[in-house]
Structures are given as C-alpha cells and as structure tokens.
Image (cartoon, rainbow, N blue to C red):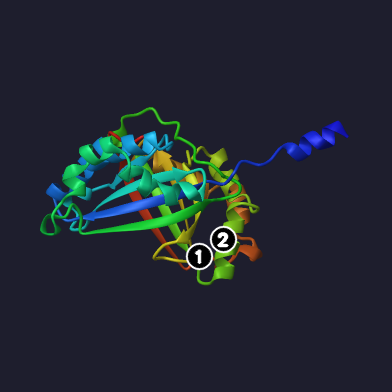
C-alpha cells in the first residue's frame, strides 16, 4: 500500500512552453540595436523574472542576407509566465534604462522591420529544455532548427506521435543529437506545425550525425511503418549560430 501511494505521488515532469521570437532586420544598424537590447536589457530582465536561460541565435550567413534574422528562444515553466512577462519588464527600472534606445526608438528609426512570435508546448517525451553538451567555440557551433508542417491536423498529430510513442526522440537521443527542445506549435503563422532544435560542435559533426541517423536500423524501421506515412507536407531547416551572449 505504501509503495502504491508513493508511485501515485510521482508525477511526470511538467511540460514547458517556449516562445520563439524572430526579429527581422534590414541592416547592421538595426541588428546592432536589437543585439544591444537583448544582451544589455532583455536577458538580464528575463533572468530577474525567473527565466534562467534564454537562447539567442542568428542564421549562418546572416550578415549577407537581405532579410537578416535574430531568433530568441524563451522557455517558460508555465503559460502564465509568458502572459506575465511584459508587465514584469515594464516594472523593471533597470530594464527600462538599459533598453531605452530600443524601447524609445522613433517610428522612422525602428530597431526592426518586423517581429514575429511562435508559441510552443514541449513534447511529452522531452518535457523540459536541455542545455547542449558542447564544448567548442560558440562561433563554430551549428544549431539546427527544424519545422515540420502537417497536411491536416490528424496527420500532424500522427507525426507528433511518431516522435513520442514511435520513438523518434529516443533515436535522436541515442545518437547524441544534443536536442534542446521538441515542441508543438500552439500559435504561429505556420500550422499545424512542430519544431525542434538539435545542436552540434560544427557543420562536419552535424553532417556525420545525420548520416548515422539516416542509416540507423531503428529509424529505417520507423520511417517505413505504414502507420506513419505522409504526415509531413512541408519542412524548413535553419542552420543557426548562438550569439556570444546567448545562455544556450
């Protein structure tokens, strides 16, 4: 009886929520303004609000892109944290002072051309964010952000099941893909959709890992399973570098 009560009291880890904030900037001046805001104002204020680790990433080749982007990954233990964060920032005097150039920018000198937000909930089999076990220079690391859209809601849920019950997450883990998160998009411009972030020491290591994944017997069996066919209609792959001031 005591053992049964103890087992009943053990709850699985609570599934986190993630905000992926994407800044679109047109030139180095805008990029620099957003960088300074994130490093000097937003990250310290997020830490003070109880968010210990915030990731900031830029696409490989970002400096020559017509549409430069900055990706910010913000983990939340509860959805209420996402809702409450703006008010917490507004009440933080240090944040207001440090971020003044960004926060008080004029309409004709905006720090970005567009900002978008994607809200996700962590997968059941990877309920909390994990920091990558990487040791090399940040400038050489490759973070691979993947987005898989489903043709219908039902087929999308089938792909989510493939990651969890089907064991796809387990294959990634066994092959040391250093996944930071796997999440279901619950609000965003591309839906139904899931996203996940894996990390590697460099591009060569990334290619080696994916070669091993493609030839893995468990993956070959899973991808050929009749119940998991035609569940992805579109995918996007983004290669990112973490900024020097990123927590992740």
Determine the image quadrant of residue 234. Answer: bottom left
State the residue at coordinates (32%, 49%). Answer: 71
Front in this rendered view, residue 7 or 173: 7
Which residue position holds label 1? 232
Image-based side of 126 in relation to 134, left or right = right
Front in this rendered view, residue 232 or 45: 45
Q: Residue furthest right?
A: 1
Where is residue 9? Give x, y as percent.
74, 37
Does 181 appear above or below 234?
above
Where is residue 163? Give x, y as percent.
58, 53
- Tell me if mark 2 has few (under 14), some (14-19) or many (20+) residues whose alpha carbon lies within 10 angstroms of its own: many
Front in this rendered view, residue 95 or 31: 95
Secondary structure at badge 2 equals helix
Determine the image quadrant of residue 26. Answer: bottom left
Does 189 appear above or below 69?
below
Check residue 159 in the rendering and tell me which mark sits there, or answer none: 2
Front in this rendered view, residue 145 or 43: 43
């Amino acid at each position: 009886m005591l053992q049964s009560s103890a087992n009943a009291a053990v709850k699985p880890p609570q599934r986190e929520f993630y905000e992926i904030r994407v800044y679109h900037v047109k030139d180095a001046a805008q990029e620099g303004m957003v960088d300074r805001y994130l490093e000097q104002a937003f990250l310290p204020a997020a830490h003070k609000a109880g968010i210990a680790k915030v990731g900031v990433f830029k696409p490989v080749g970002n400096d020559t892109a017509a549409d430069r982007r900055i990706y910010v990954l913000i983990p939340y233990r509860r959805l209420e944290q996402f809702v409450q964060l703006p008010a917490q920032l507004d009440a933080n005097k240090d944040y207001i002072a440090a971020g003044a150039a960004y926060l008080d920018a004029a309409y004709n000198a905006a720090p970005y051309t567009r900002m978008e937000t994607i809200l996700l909930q962590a997968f059941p089999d990877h309920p909390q964010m994990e920091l990558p076990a990487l040791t090399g220079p940040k400038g050489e690391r490759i973070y691979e952000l993947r987005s898989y859209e489903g043709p219908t809601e039902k087929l999308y849920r089938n792909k989510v099941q493939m990651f969890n019950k089907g064991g796809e997450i387990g294959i990634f883990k066994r092959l040391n893909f250093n996944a930071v998160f796997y999440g279901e998009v619950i609000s965003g411009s591309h839906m139904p959709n899931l996203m996940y972030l894996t990390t590697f020491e460099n591009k060569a290591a990334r290619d080696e890992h994916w070669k091993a994944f493609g030839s893995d017997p468990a993956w070959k069996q899973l991808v050929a399973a009749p119940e998991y066919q035609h569940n992805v209609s579109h995918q996007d792959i983004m290669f990112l570098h973490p900024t020097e001031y990123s927590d992740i």
